[in-house]
Image (cartoon, rainbow, N blue to C red):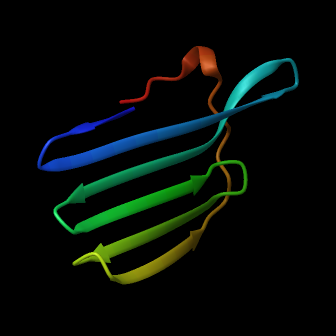
Amino acid sequence: HYGGSADRWGYKHTFKYMNGDWYLVRQNIRTMHGLDGKNVDSDLAAGTEETTIIKEGTNTKKTIIKSTPKPLVKLSDFAPF
């Protein structure tokens, strides 16, 4: 999904076929306003989340958070918002 005018946003979801069903294993959420933005990339299977903050198009700050993986969501139970 992608949209916006002055404010831009995008969502990317990755599913993997495992154990006879499709599961959400990764999601990426990106927001931008002018030259400033934020990108959050989550590896749901591994329990990691990498956040990148973009200021004025050049300066970036990355943060990586590691947590215990939660049960994965089946495609049949998925709601993007």
Number of marks present in the image shown? 0
Identify the residue shown where x is 52% and y is 57%. 41
In the picture, the quarter occupied by the C terminus is: top left
Q: Position of residue 42 (x, y in %)?
A: 56, 54
Q: Is residue 7 above or below residue 48?
A: above
In the picture, the quarter occupied by the N terminus is: top left
Q: Is residue 37 above or below residue 3?
A: below
Q: Is residue 39 above or below residue 77?
A: below
Nearest the eye: 29 or 32: 32
Identify the residue shown where x is 36% and y is 43%. 10
Residue, far top: 76
Q: For residue 49, what is the image quadrant? A: bottom right
Residue 37 is left or right of residue 49, and the answer is: left
Residue 34 is left or right of residue 72, and the answer is: left
Identify the residue shown where x is 41% and y is 49%. 29
Nearest the eye: 38 or 67: 38
Q: For residue 61, what is the image quadrant? A: bottom left
Identify the residue shown where x is 70% and y is 29%. 23
Q: Position of residue 76 (x, y in %)?
A: 60, 14
Q: Position of residue 19 (x, y in %)?
A: 88, 25
Residue, far right: 19
Q: Is residue 21 above or below residue 10?
A: above
